[in-house]
Amino acid sequence: MELIAVDDCGFEPNFKFLKEKPYVPLLALYFKNNNLIDLKIKKIKIDGLDGTEKLMEILNERKAELILSAGITFGGFNIIDFVEIYEKLGIPSLIILEQLPNMQEVYDALIKHFPDYEIRIKIINKFPPIKSYKDIFFEAIGISEDEAIKIINSTRIFSRMPEPLRIAHLLGYAIYKLKSSKI
């Protein structure tokens, strides 16, 4: 199965308080049998709403059979609508979470900090219920719970997170550290 693992790169916290937000790289790492075979990068706006569009651009350049993600927010609160991606492109998603989010805190933060909070909450509410499996939580879009568990088990190697997500996170962190260093 060819899948992509999606993650972002970190950014300096002071960016959150700028009126005109900068951009952060959105990484899409393509894997086959847990081996990295390709990488695509697009820029998304910190706290923007362009993440879904940018990920669809990546997927139109090169299809995948499944999207793996460690959450639905990238570059702050740039929410990727994996349900819309499934509806438009037919590509299922498996969102892996290490801990359950406190949804009331999420909604409160959106209402407090975003004039377009209604749009963001509407996207969040489209997602299926969060399921638990062993030591993680997941949301499956376009695949069954059993299929999701098989994928989780077949992609775990060194940690409780699927290996493609672990590698995507490490690469995102490395790019962030490189960008923020004075080299």
Image: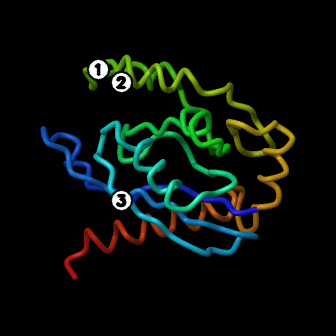
Please state if 166 lies on the left or on the right of 112 as rendered.
right
Where is residue 89? Give x, y as percent.
59, 43
Please state if 151 lies on the left or on the right of 48 as rendered.
right
Where is residue 158? Give x, y as percent.
72, 68
Disc 2 vs disc 3: which is toward the camera? 3
Residue labelled with disc 3: 25
Q: Judge by depth and name the residue closer to the eye, 70 or 98.
A: 70
Q: Secondary structure at mark 2?
A: helix
Q: Quadrant of residue 141?
A: top right
CB atoms at circles 2 and 3 under 8 Å apart?
Answer: no
Where is residue 27? Give x, y as percent.
46, 61
At a point 51% along the width and 67% down the height, the residue shown is: 170
Residue 93 seen from this side? no
In the picture, which quadrant includes the N terminus?
bottom right
**At label 1, which amino acid type do we have?**
Lys
CB atoms at circles 2 and 1 under 8 Å apart?
Answer: yes
Residue labelled with disc 1: 112
Q: Secondary structure at mark 3?
A: strand
Q: Quadrant of residue 20?
A: top left
Marks 2 and 1, how far apart at CA? 5 Å
CB atoms at circles 3 and 1 under 8 Å apart?
Answer: no
Specify few, some or many for label 2: CA neighbours under 10 Å numbering under 14, 14-19, or 20 or more.
Answer: some
Residue labelled with disc 2: 110
At a point 26% along the width and 55% down the height, the residue shown is: 12
